[in-house]
Image (cartoon, rainbow, N blue to C red):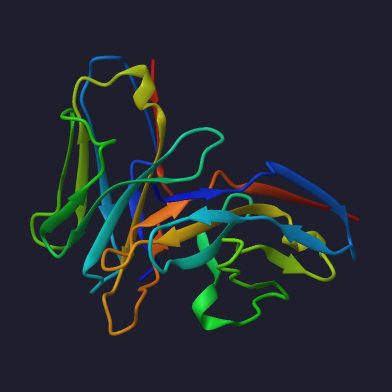
Amino acid sequence: AQRVTQPEKLLSVFKGAPVELKCNYSYSGSPELFWYVQYSRQRLQLLLRHISRESIKGFTADLNKGETSFHLKKPFAQEEDSAMYYCALSSYNTDKLIFGTGTRLQVFP
Amino acid sequence: DTGVSQDPRHKITKRGQNVTFRCDPISEHNRLYWYRQTLGQGPEFLTYFQNEAQLEKSRLLSDRFSAERPKGSFSTLEIQRTEQGDSAMYLCASSLVGTGFYNEQFFGPGTRLTVL
């Protein structure tokens, strides 16, 4: 079964602290993995995808096929990073997204 | 073009009533998706269209749900005989199929349905 698991509902850190939002997945085949973010009162938007291997707003995520993980990391959290983060995987051909339950990141000053 | 739009943004209805939501995708986007999000959960896929053809429906989409995209532009999602369990945020997204493996989906603001 295709599934995305985000074990933490809430992650609270202070500004400047490192952040790691965990994501594990199960998928038969080669998945495409993503992180979506939803800031307060804004719509869901793509943060980054594993295939592009880029850093967005200081965030990076590495796909570990052996551990079936795609954790999101940032070395120094900022207050503006406070948001809801969803890990998702895509099914080939349809692009339909399978989301995890989300992790709320709170960054305190 | 201000992105994907959805109407209405909020809908309160009584159990047993029918409701219809509209989604206007980004111009020229040929794929349109519907998702449902309940409290504490991530969005769950319901169905998607490529142009006017409905290509896949989730098992979550019971017989009371029907979606259309008659001219390959806007889409409607109708729920008949609403139940309290239908209360959720209904999200629409659109994308442009290109040559890449994944075509980024752009989400609308959602329609929040409350069934009393």
* Residue closest to the far front: A66
Q: Quadrant of residue A61?
A: bottom right
Left or right, B17 with respect to A55, comes to left
Q: Is residue A95 above or below residue B84?
A: below
Residue B70 horizontal side relative to residue B101, left or right: left
The image shows residue B69 at horizontal and vertical percentages of: 14, 54
Q: Nearer the viewer, residue A27 or B41?
A: A27
Q: Please determine whether, in this image, residue B22 is positioned above or below residue A43.
A: above
Q: Is residue B32 visible?
A: yes
Q: Which residue is drawn at the image coordinates 31% and 67% (left, top)? A: A92
Asked where in the image residue B77 lies, by quadrant, the reply is top left
Figure quadrant of the C terminus of chain B? top left
Which residue lies at the image location 25% right of the left edge and 46% below the top edge? B22
Res A43 visible: no
Residue B46 horizontal/vertical position (percent): 29, 44
- Does B49 appear above or below A52? above
Position of A42 with respect to A80 (left or right) is: left
Q: Where is residue B90 drawn, in percent x and y?
A: 37, 41
Find residue A57 and report its image quarter: bottom right
The total of numbered circles placed on residues is: 0
Q: Quadrant of the N terminus of chain B?
A: bottom left
Say left or right for B4 vs A50.
left
For image coordinates 31% across by 63% down, the residue present is B94
